[in-house]
């Protein structure tokens, strides 16, 4: 597929895809578009806008609707596209400046930091918790799923997040260097994908993908190619090409994280990706001299380059083992 020859959707085009899926529904749940082959097979979820301002996944929906389905059909099973955080994404498309876009990550709760008891809560005012409860039967129906994310800022490289198990054969043709593992074990609360699927999830692929900056064309290409490759691997569409290129991946095992107790704390130095930290090292300090220490040896990942996190309930950064080759 020569995606570079296509006129990939800009923010206006992505908004059209957002409007389409927002107005779609399945089993009475809005923001869900299902395509069924009529032949028994896996139910595959493609989830987008788990954070409202991470919209690269809409390019995969655009390609699937306008370029894939007109020329090919599903071989078996079904594909379900889900717009996870509708209201946050709607705010994003109303934003006028990059600063406003950054505020559209969520409405009330980060959908990748949901409480463990999300599905048991009642009378909750949080939009994301209510939305997760509404999506529960859809999410749990997935046999496998790909959760598409992107960065609002430029610079961070694309990365694959393996949930529950590793799938080297699935991702070997994806031109993405970094693979993150065990982040769902270490992070505070639960990512949306932890509620996907049913028993035996470790036997089926559930993958998160950070496509890169959603302002860059390359991120849209990665969202599209990875989605089609994922569906081909599962046998839902076409057959795997016999001579796909194979790429080397660097695996980063997440083993720890750093939190600040309140917004008075500041990092003591830069912790850009790959910065080495040692167990017991001071990483944060407040004006009264109280300090936060690293809990383990490793290298840092996912620091957002700010002195203190915008959401005090989220990690300042994660700590990974030195990468495997």
Image (cartoon, rainbow, N blue to C red):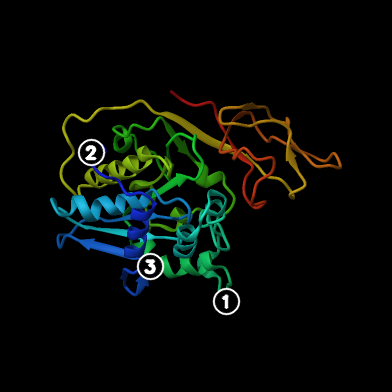
Question: Can residue 146 be seen in the rendering of this structure?
Answer: no
Are discs 2 and 1 less than 8 Å apart at CB?
A: no
Residue 137, disc: 3
The residue drawn where x is 44% and y is 64% is 86
CA separation, marks 2 and 3?
A: 39 Å
Q: Secondary structure at mark 2?
A: helix
Tell me if residue 245 comes above or below residue 212 in the rendering. above
Q: Quadrant of the C terminus?
A: top left
Q: Secondary structure at mark 3?
A: helix
Residue 123, disc: 1
Q: For mark 2, what is the residue?
A: 5
Look at discs 2 and 3 and give the one toward the viewer: 2
The residue drawn where x is 56% and y is 44% is 186
Q: Secondary structure at mark 1?
A: loop
10 Å crowding of disc 3: few (<14), some (14-19), many (20+): some
Tell me if residue 64 comes above or below residue 186 in the rendering. below
Out of 294 and 209, give the one closest to the viewer. Answer: 209
The residue drawn where x is 18% and y is 39% is 240
10 Å crowding of disc 2: few (<14), some (14-19), many (20+): few
């Amino acid at each position: 597929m020569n995606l570079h020859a296509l006129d990939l959707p800009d923010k206006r085009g992505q908004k059209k895809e957002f409007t389409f899926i927002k107005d779609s529904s399945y089993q009475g749940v809005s923001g869900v578009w299902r395509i069924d082959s009529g032949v028994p097979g896996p139910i595959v979820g493609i989830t987008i806008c788990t954070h409202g301002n991470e919209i690269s996944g809409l390019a995969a929906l655009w390609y699937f609707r306008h370029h894939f389905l007109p020329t090919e059909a599903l071989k078996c099973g079904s594909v379900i596209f889900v717009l996870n955080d509708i209201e946050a994404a709607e705010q994003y498309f109303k934003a006028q400046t990059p600063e406003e876009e950054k505020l559209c990550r969520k409405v009330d709760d980060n959908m990748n930091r949901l409480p463990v008891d999300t599905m048991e809560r009642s009378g909750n005012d949080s939009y994301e918790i209510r939305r997760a409860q509404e999506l529960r039967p859809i999410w749990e129906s997935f046999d496998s799923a790909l959760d598409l994310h992107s960065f609002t800022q430029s610079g961070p490289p694309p990365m694959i997040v393996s949930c529950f198990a590793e799938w080297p054969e699935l991702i070997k043709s994806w031109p993405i260097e970094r693979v993150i593992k065990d982040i769902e074990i270490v992070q505070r609360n639960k990512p949306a994908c932890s509620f996907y699927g049913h028993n035996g999830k470790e036997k089926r692929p559930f993958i998160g993908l950070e496509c890169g900056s959603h302002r860059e064309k390359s991120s849209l290409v990665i969202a599209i190619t990875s989605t089609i490759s994922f569906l081909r691997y599962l046998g839902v569409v076409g057959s795997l090409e016999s001579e796909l290129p194979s790429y080397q991946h660097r695996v980063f095992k997440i083993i720890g994280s750093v939190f600040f107790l309140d917004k008075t704390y500041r990092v003591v130095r830069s912790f850009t990706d790959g910065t080495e930290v040692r167990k017991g090292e001071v990483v944060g300090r407040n004006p009264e001299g109280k300090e936060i220490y690293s809990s383990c040896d490793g290298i840092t990942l996912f620091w957002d380059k700010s002195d203190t996190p915008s959401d005090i309930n989220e990690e300042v950064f994660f700590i990974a083992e030195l990468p495997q080759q």
